[in-house]
Amino acid sequence: MKLLTDVPQYKKVIINHLDTGHGTAKKLESLGIRKNVQLKKISPLKSKGPVILSFLNSNCQIAIGHGIAKKIFVSEIS
Amino acid sequence: MNRILLFGNPNVGKSVIFSRLTGIDVLMSNYPGTTVELKQGTIKLKNKIYQIIDIPGTYSLSATNKAEEVAINILSSATKNDIILVVIDSTNLERNLFLTLEILKKKLPTILVLNKWDLTQIWGTKINIDNLSKMLDVVVVPVVGISGDGIKNLVETLTHFSLNPKISSVKLPEKNDNIWKFIGKITFSAQTLSHKHPSSFEKLQELTITMPYALIIALSILIFSFIIIRFLGENLTNYFLDPIFNKFYMPFVKNLAETFITNKHILKLLLGNVPEPMESFGILTTGLYVPFVIVLPYIFSFYLILSFLEDSGYLVRVAVVLDNFFHKFGLHGYASIPILLGLGCKVPAVLSTRILENEREKIISVVLILMLTPCLPQSAMIFSILSRYGFVTILSVFFILIFIGLVVGFFLNKILKGETPELFVEMPSYQLPPVFILLKKLYIRMKSFLFESVPMIIFGIFIVNIFDLIGIMHFITKILGPIMTKILGLPDEISIVMISGFLRKDVSIALLTPFDLSLKQTIISCVVLVIYLPCIATFFMLLKEFKLKKSLIIVSSIFLFSMIIGAMLNILL
Ligand SMILES: Nc1nc2c(ncn2[C@@H]2O[C@H](COP(=O)(O)OP(=O)(O)OP(=O)(O)O)[C@@H](O)[C@H]2O)c(=O)[nH]1
Ligand SMILES: [Mg+2]
């Protein structure tokens, strides 16, 4: 398990755990970011800006602030 | 009256469908959060008139900002006599179903509209409408909002439905985890995905959000846009509208007025006292020259470019790229959208701060909207009167403004208590802006200028004349004059310019022309006239969004601050 911000560019991940407050978690969920969802990270590893993700099961891209991305735990998948 | 409510996630095309169903023009753009207030229209279904309402998009039924609050409130007011149209982006079924299920829980007559049906082909998504309809127990209609395909079918379905409204009897899971399982089941049986992405294009898209390319691209687009806007604006004025005005229009009205009107005062009110259209201050001369010859070309060129950026999907990327930078001012990148809208007109810009989460963020962005840049009509006037001093002078006015704005934003972030919310934003894929949307938006924005702003400009010129006639001008000059001369180093007659700026900002800059100011005085007065007070239309929008007390605090602090800035410039320059 690692933080979403520590995932290299173009790696696919699955979300294990959201360490955010309840409100943020709910908002993330309504955008489709929730436990067990599979994503591909689009933004580069070193980026200090928002983390950009694309969903593996739809054509949707999402940007989330760096501060939130640091609270999302994921595992890399192949 | 019974209602039809257009509900759905942001950016799924509700406003496009609203406009197709009602023929009413509303703003539509390729970013989430275009619509922030309700828009009403009507539609006739089988002799019965329904009110149809375009609603701000929302991701869920717990509001995170004012726009979503508006949406959620109207849903709670809905009854079994209303029809809910849940609009879905067909390429994004899974996420859209989350809100759909929340709405179905309300047990109201609901129809599911699968918009952007054209994209399912391109993205290789196959949706089985029958399965979807069966599993949710609702009527499902695929449409293509931008081309109008399927709209006729939607109207027929609505007509039929209005006679036999149906409430879905689907059994929805109570627990949250099970909701996603249920959604998974639906997508499994109703949707097949085959990925066939055009990959080189995708790489190009990614460059627009990857540093440092993103910054280079953003700067190039900014400069390029600026050049086009100025080129179009200036040339339309100089080679087309100004000649028409001076060669044909002026001699014509002059003859007409002088033939029919003998009263000296009225003649002066209409034609002004000198022949130059910018300096005469007649209602039929300056009153029309400012809006039609100088400002209108810029309105046209600016909104042409802005619509292009909005609809291509680039504006959202700007917000993402600027996120880091905006954190320095206590904002997240999405605040760049209201601020960019403020380059055009502050009124819709202030309204669109509804997409921001908290009060602190709204206040900071409103201050930036009001201080960072002039509105477009005012910019056009500044270009026009400063052009004789050269381009560098024009740039320096804008540079001073942006610098002051950023410093203020920086300090507000330090002073105001609270946290900076984090960015969450869906990034719609790039698209070629649909021509019909581009044209419609240009039309909406030009119309709003012609019908809302032009009368105010003429009224502003009228008031200045009346003040002059009854001697109030003298009175105002006497009271405010010393402030002008002592603090700002400007002639005391400029007081009247200050008063008029509250009516219309472009008029106030036009009023500077007859004064024969020095370069330094021109710069100071332009800077002060941009920030000192919002125009009256903006002031009312502030009142609407922030209530009286907060609005007054914001406006009076900015006013005091602008005087300090003016005084400092007077000393420094
Ligand atoms: N390809 C395609 N694009 C569409 C279709 N309908 C709408 N769009 C695009 O979707 C974008 C959003 O449209 P809007 O009508 O502004 O969306 P909205 O749901 O009102 O969005 P908010 O007001 O932000 O909630 C626009 O850029 C349209 O060009 C469609 O049928 N096909
Ligand atoms: Mg809309």
Image (cartoon, rainbow, N blue to C red):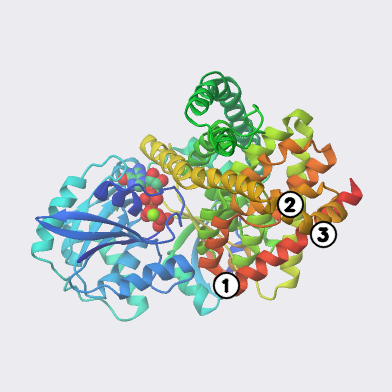
Are the residues tagged 1 and 2 within 8 Å (C-beta)? no
Task: Name the residue tied to disc 2.
Answer: B474
Q: Is residue B14 left or right of residue B467?
A: left
- Bin the neighbour count of mark 3 within 10 Å (Cα to Cα): few under 14, some 14-19, many 20 and up: some
The answer to whether the beta carbon of the residue marked 1 is less than 8 Å from any atom of ligand 1 is no
Q: Given the image, on which type of amino acid does mark 1 rest? A: Leu
Q: Given the image, on which type of amino acid does mark 2 rest? A: His
Which secondary structure lies at badge 3? helix
* Residue B366, percent from left and from top: 62, 61
Q: Given the image, on which type of amino acid does mark 3 rest? A: Ile
From the image, state whether disc 3 or disc 2 is nearer to you: 2
Q: Chain of mark 2?
A: B
Q: Is residue B338 above or below residue B152?
A: below
Task: Name the residue tied to disc 3.
Answer: B564
Q: Chain of mark 1?
A: B
The answer to whether the beta carbon of the residue marked 3 is less than 8 Å from any atom of ligand 1 is no
Q: Is residue A51 visible?
A: no
| Quadrant, the N terminus of chain B | bottom left
- Bin the neighbour count of mark 2 within 10 Å (Cα to Cα): few under 14, some 14-19, many 20 and up: some
Which secondary structure lies at badge 2? helix
Task: Name the residue tied to disc 1.
Answer: B548
* Residue B78, percent from left and from top: 26, 72
